[in-house]
Image (cartoon, rainbow, N blue to C red):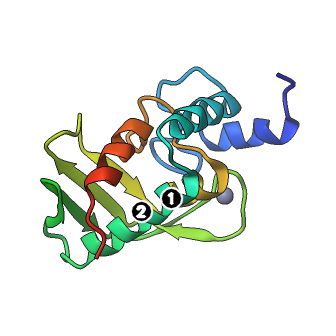
Amino acid sequence: MKEDPGMKKVYENMKPGVVSLHGFLGSDKRNIEQIVEHDLVTLGELGLTTETIADMLEKLRDKAFSGFGEWVDIGGGLLAKSDSIRGKLPCPFEHKGLYRKTVTSIRGEGLDKEVIYTDLGIHLVREHGFFQGKGSPFRLEPEQLFYIFEKFVYE
Ligand SMILES: [Zn+2]
């Protein structure tokens, strides 16, 4: 794959301490395009799109937000919680605008570990098909999202 010079800057932005404290890549050694490509294939195999996932993450965030910091039952033995953190983050792909640092957590039976994401994370999925690198605290595993998608009861 030919190196896109624009992506070099994006890659720099994703390192820890540039846009966010932990960065977006975790311990993943792949480049951003490879991470995106691999997750999109997995998502396709699961019959999902980035749009569907981003919509779900937004609805879950809103549902969690209604709990004002307490865990909220979202169906299927899953709980969600929303924590507002002061401050905003820019998109590492250098889009204009800032994203709230609201952190949504989902936990419950059937999940390997707590699924945690921010509003920026939703944007990264929707606009960039980017679920973050392996080992990033905000990494979203397509299989786990699929599990939540199957359980979450929309109201
Ligand atoms: Zn963006």
Where residue 138 sits: x, y (%)?
41, 45
Query: Is residue 4 rendered to the left or right of residue 49?
Result: right
Compared to residue 127, the image places residue 59 above or below, namely: below
Name the secondary structure under disc 1: helix
> Which residue in the structure is indicated by mark 1?
52
Give the residue drawn at x 45%, y 69%: 87
Q: Relative to 33, is 28 above or below?
A: above
Question: Quick one: quadrant of the N terminus?
Answer: top right
Q: Is residue 85 visible?
A: no
Q: Amino acid at mark 1?
A: Thr
Q: Look at the image and tell me whether residue 117 can be seen.
A: yes
State the residue at coordinates (22%, 39%): 111
The location of residue 50, given as percent across then percent down, is 56, 52
* Residue 118 in the image: above or below residue 130: below
Tell me the crowding category of disc 2: few under 14, some 14 to 19, or many 20 or more residues within 10 angstroms, Cα based: some
Q: Quadrant of the C terminus?
A: bottom left
Give the Cα distance between marks 2 and 1.
Answer: 6 Å
Residue hosting label 2: 56
Nearer to the camera, 49 or 9: 49
Label 1 near label 2: C-beta < 8 Å? yes
* Whole-percent x, y for residue 65 in the image: 28, 75
Relative to 150, does residue 43 appear above or below in the rendering?
above
Q: Residues within 10 Å of mark 1 (few under 14, many from 20)?
A: few
Ligand 1, by image quadrant, is bottom right
In this rendering, position of residue 23 left or right of residue 5: left
